[in-house]
Image (tube, rainbow, N blue to C red):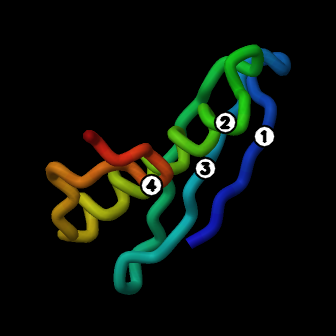
Amino acid sequence: MEFTTENTNNGELLTITLISKIGAEDYRAQESIPVLQADADEIRRAKARLISRFNERNGKSVVGKPLPGDAPHA
């Protein structure tokens, strides 16, 4: 599993792409966030959403689990 990032839409968006394999199938998912909102936390959350979608597609249950890096609930 790897991530790539690039500026898209004339530099207004940061597009994060997850690239992996599910069996023999190539899997790609993208998420774009406005560059002005692209701080480290937002990038981490975008990557976590991509991983969650990958896990759902790959048949791994993620319901009710916090996103990686989120603070535990009190």
Q: What element carries label 4?
A: loop
The first of marks 1 and 2 along the sequence is 1
Q: Is residue 52 toward the left or the right of residue 59 in the image?
A: right
The first of marks 1 and 4 along the sequence is 1
Query: Are dots 3 and 2 in contact, CB under 8 Å?
Result: yes
Query: Are dots 1 and 2 in contact, CB under 8 Å?
Result: yes
Residue located 74% across and 46% down the image: 5
Three-letter amino acid code of the residue under disc 4:
Pro
Q: Is mark 2 on a helix, strand or loop?
A: strand
Q: Is residue 45 toward the left or the right of residue 15 in the image?
A: left
Residue 3 in picture, x, y percent from top left: 65, 59
Residue hosting label 4: 68
Residue hosting label 2: 15
Judge depth for marks 1 and 4 and give the one in front.
4
Residue hosting label 1: 6
Q: Within 10 angstroms of label 3, few (less than 14), some, or many (20 or more) residues?
A: some
Marks 1 and 3, Cα distance to the nearest angstrom?
9 Å
Query: Are dots 1 and 3 in contact, CB under 8 Å?
Result: yes
**Viewer-nearest residue: 62 or 18:** 62
Residue hosting label 3: 17
Q: Within 10 angstroms of label 1, few (less than 14), some, or many (20 or more) residues?
A: few
